[in-house]
Image (spheres, helix red, strand yellow):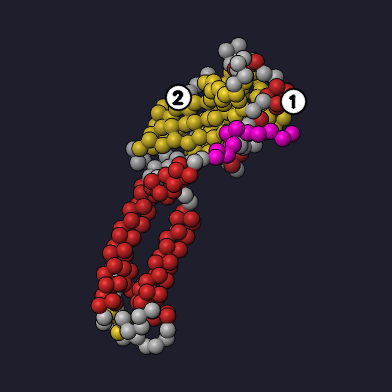
Amino acid sequence: MEKNNFMTTPVKRSSTSLFSNVFIDFYHLVVRTTWPRFLASFVFVFLAINFLFGFLYFIKDDSIAGLKGIGFLEYFFFSVQTLATIGYGSMYPQTLYGHILVTIEAMVGLLGVGMFAALAFARISLPRSRVVFSKTAVVNTFEGQPALMFRMANERKNRIIGAEVELSLFMQETTKDGYSMRRIYDLNLARNHTPMLALTWLVIHPIDEKSPLSKFSQGDLAKADFALVATIKGLDETVSQTIHSNHTYTFEDIRWNHRFVDLYRKNESGMNDFIDQTLIHDTILDTR
């Protein structure tokens, strides 16, 4: 079955918006990127600047004194020393042209080092959650009533204080007037707050007469363009800052008449139960 999931539908943006995203919103772009991309960008920019200034020194071969005659590489490494404010002293500018380039490169180096250091600190200091959501949600009976359930766990060895979870149904619908629009339904939960999240949490949405899901059968949902978005926020007790996380479930992520595998296990001695978080995604068909 091919179905367009509107949660991941690409958006065509204007050129002005694209410019804003890349340049004006540069900070958020850097913070959102991965560490490998951030470090790769640093290496690329560092090498590009040094190649540029190395070339500018190279086109005036008398601008730098103390060279040993190995060509462009010497100018490149002189640029590295200048940009990084190393200055071994064996090479130095000897013309006005060279002094002007060194002055410009020194300013670029100071600005660049400060900028990358600030961005790296921002990335490190930014609080991030390590809440893992079960890859699937299940629909089964819970205490005699149909319910949609999924699990969460805190992967850190600390607690999330005052954790709150919300579950919303995003559905593409057509109004009576023929307008196509995205409606958002807030789904009630059996419990949407816990004083602290240290281990795991089974989130339960009762599918009663008040639930929007009660209007749809399994076949109806298979044809619908919808998504279930779960969000959690709370206070990280270690850094005393608010953290949040979210996860999206589509029809393919829902297991009907399944139940989650029990996370509680006993050690080899048969005492002191423990929770095996590696089983958080596992479900089995309920034959009861």
Q: CA distance from mark 2 to mark 1?
A: 31 Å
Local SS, label 2 = strand
Q: Is residue 255 visible?
A: yes
Q: Quadrant of residue 162?
A: top left
Instruction: Identify the residue at horizontal 28%, vertical 76% (top origin).
Output: 97
Which stretch appears magenta?
1-12
Disc 2 packing (10 Å; few <14; some 14–19; many ≥20): some
Above or below, 286 relative to 154 = above
Circle nearer the viewer, 2 or 1: 2
Image disc number at residue 192: none
- Using the image as rendered, state which of residue 138 and residue 11 is in the foreground: 11
Q: Which residue is mark 1?
A: 287
Q: Which residue is mark 2?
A: 193
The earlier-in-sequence mark between 2 and 1 is: 2
Q: Position of residue 180 (x, y in %)?
A: 60, 23
Instruction: Identify the residue at horizontal 39%, vertical 67% (top origin).
Output: 49
Q: Is residue 110 left or right of residue 15?
A: left
Instruction: Identify the residue at horizontal 44%, vertical 35% (top origin).
Output: 244
Instruction: Identify the residue at horizontal 51%, vertical 40% (top origin).
Output: 13
- Asked if residue 31 is among those painted magenta in the image, a careful observer would answer no
Local SS, label 1 = loop
Please, what is the three-letter code of the amino acid marked with disc 2?
A: His
Q: Report the magenta stretch's main SS.
A: loop
Please, what is the three-letter code of the amino acid marked with disc 1?
A: Thr
- Using the image as rendered, state which of residue 98 and residue 243 is in the foreground: 98
Above or below, 249 relative to 82 = above
Q: Position of residue 5 (x, y in %)?
A: 63, 33
Q: Quadrant of residue 8?
A: top right
In which quadrant is the C terminus drawn?
A: top right
Q: Is residue 260 visible?
A: no
Q: Is residue 231 left or right of residue 125?
A: right
